[in-house]
Amino acid sequence: TLPSSAAVLVYREPVYNWQATKNTVKERFAFLFNNEVLSDVHFLVGKGMGVQRIPAHRFALAVGSAVFDAMFNGGMATTSTEIELPDVEPAAFLALLKFLYSDEVQIGPETVMTTLYTAKKYAVPALEAHCVEFLKKNLRADNAFMLLTQARLFDEPQLASLCLENIDKNTIDALSAEGFTDIDLDTLIAVLERDTLGVREVRLFGAAVRWAEAEAQRQQLEPTPENKRKVLGKALSLIRFPLMTIEEFAAGPAQSGILTDREVVSLFLHFTVNPKPHVEFIDRPRCCLRGKECSIIRFGQVESRWGYSGTSDRIRFSVNRRIFVVGFGLYGSIHGPTDYQVNIQIIHTDSNTVLGQNDTGFSCDGSANTFRVMFKEPVEILPSVNYIACATLKGPDSHYGTKGMRKVTHEGPATGTKTCFTFCYAAGNNNGTSVEDGQIPEVIFYT
């Protein structure tokens, strides 16, 4: 038996004849990673006290990266054996070299962003893809905004769109996360422009104000209402104030000092008078749903003269699968272009609970078409449950539908998914609307 000291020697990597202990090209290259053996270049990576001197091999780097190839072999090639890289993190540079020498991926939450930057800088798309994959796996509501900022910075559109989808699905959690107030203005605008956020508009306004306070601090400004408005810039115009209830608006935005007196007055008028005056803010609902808008019409023919005396038109309905109703199509005037005041509701029949409603108005052109009236947010409709669709109109006599159908089926063009509506008479005051004829011809929904 060998003495124990010799046994130690056997297992130590011999620098002389080390090649004999490596059976494959991969093993031989992996041995050279971060190793002085045969090295012909050194990188001084990082800055200040954190600089690391890392040995490397021109050939190995040039084989794995066109940027290194140009650095060592191109027309402007460097002859220097010490290359300074102050903009690169040592850990990220080592992760890049590890990958180039051995195909091994070494990334963690702390280093993934700097490694992604380094992989892009040295044109190593395979490592870049591993970084993006790692980020996708670790994408959560509480880091979605932070990752979205990075994805936009590093021009990673696929990662950016996954972050935005996550923010759509978990809007409230994402807005509450620490990283939200650190995003840049362009990212804030990209989010506020979306039609698919799942949150009440008043909460979105509150989040934008929090962001503005943080941004004012970053710009060393006092967090006054004027400065908050200034730092928000175009983002303020993307808050959809008309989607708030009058109570939400009065309690928050109207008193914030961020809106001008003129804007506050015009929004209060928008909430309270009909026909609604034009406001500078978007009133399109944010529908936190994907896919295409669908609609069904329950009448076969349109006739004229349906009158209104303050009673609601009502029809009972149920569906065979879960959907989200976003609005109704209603008939308009037989007397040419007119404005109507209208309140629309969806009521859960058994509990008599109002699930969604909107006090609004619509303009019609005198034709027999339907005119869209939308809820402020989507109303979830569950299968085999009875609901009442309700519309209370104020205005002149209108068209109405006849040859109504008890069952109406919508088939999704791409998927072939069938959504089947069953309509029934709604007892009580219904202004004469029934399965056979009346108002509320169209239901607009997402599946």
Image: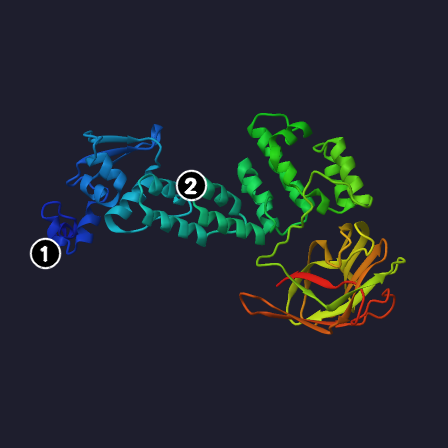
The kind of residue tagged 2 is: Phe
Disc 2 residue crowd, few under 14, some 14–19, many 20+, Cα 10 Å: some
Q: What is the x, y in percent for residue 4?
A: 14, 53
Q: CA distance from mark 2 to mark 1?
A: 57 Å
400 and 20: which is toward the camera: 400
The kind of residue tagged 1 is: Leu
Q: What is the x, y in percent for residue 88?
A: 34, 35
In the rendered structure, the answer to whether residue 50 lies left or right of residue 171 reads left
Corner quadrant of residue 50? top left
175 and 316: which is toward the camera: 316
Label 1: which secondary element = loop
372 and 357: which is toward the camera: 372
The answer, for residue 400, to whether it is visible in the render is yes
Query: What residue did someone put label 1 on?
Result: 2
> Which residue is at 80% across, 63% downward?
400
> Which residue is at 19% across, 36% downward?
73
Disc 1 residue crowd, few under 14, some 14–19, many 20+, Cα 10 Å: few
Label 2: which secondary element = loop
| Residue extending furthest toward the bottom | 406
> Which residue is at 86% across, 54% downward?
396
314, above or below 35, in the image: below
Q: What is the x, y in percent for residue 359?
A: 79, 51
> Which residue is at 64% across, 67% downward?
322
In the rendered structure, the answer to whether residue 221 lies left or right of residue 50 reads right
Query: What residue did someone put label 2 on?
Result: 154
